Amino acid sequence: MILVDTSVWIDHFRQRNVELREIIENDRLLCHPFIIGELALGSLRDREAVIGFLQAQRETVVATHDEVMTFIDRYSIFSMGIGYTDAHLLASTLLDRRVSLWTRDKRLLAAAQKAGASVHMAASNPH
């Protein structure tokens, strides 16, 4: 299962990503409510359809505030330039080891690797 970060979705909305489409078609997509919220705050074409689609997808495990705070300290991911939403995505990935995180955010990727989280590495030609 693949948890897709905001950075990947934004690129996909600009230019369709074949690999992301395949993940969706193969029912391997997981969504996090914070990602849906971040996307809802942006400029989306066909806003209602996009948000509706994302909300209809399976939701990943959502960590509690206490779990996220524990992971921040346990894996020393503070001072790495990631935000609280990123820490939540990372915690979700660590709580369910069947999940891989797909991000284009270099800082989040570094934090995920430091914590030993599973990371989805995109194909070399994503479009």
Image (spheres, rainbow, N blue to C red):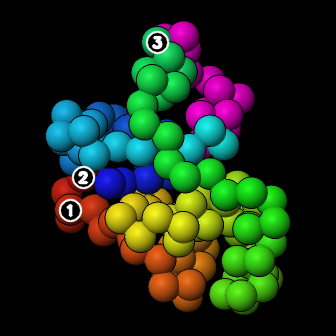
Residue 122 horizontal side relative to residue 94, left or right = left
Q: CA distance from mark 3 to mark 1?
A: 27 Å
**Callout 3: helix, strand or loop?**
helix
- Residue 58, located in which quarter of the rendered image? top left
What amino acid type is highlighted by mark number 2?
Pro
Pair 3/2: label in front: 3
Label 2 near label 1: C-beta < 8 Å? yes
Q: Which mark is residue 107?
A: none
Tag 2 or tag 3, which sits nearer the N-term? 3
Q: Which mark is residue 126?
A: 2
User: Is any part of residue 7 visible from this angle?
Assistant: no
Question: Which residues fall within the magenta stretch?
Answer: 35-48
Q: Which mark is residue 49?
A: 3
- Residue 75, located in which quarter of the rendered image? bottom right
Percent from the top left, x then y, of residue 78? 78, 81
Where the C terminus falls, by quadrant?
top left
Residue 114 horizontal side relative to residue 15, left or right = right
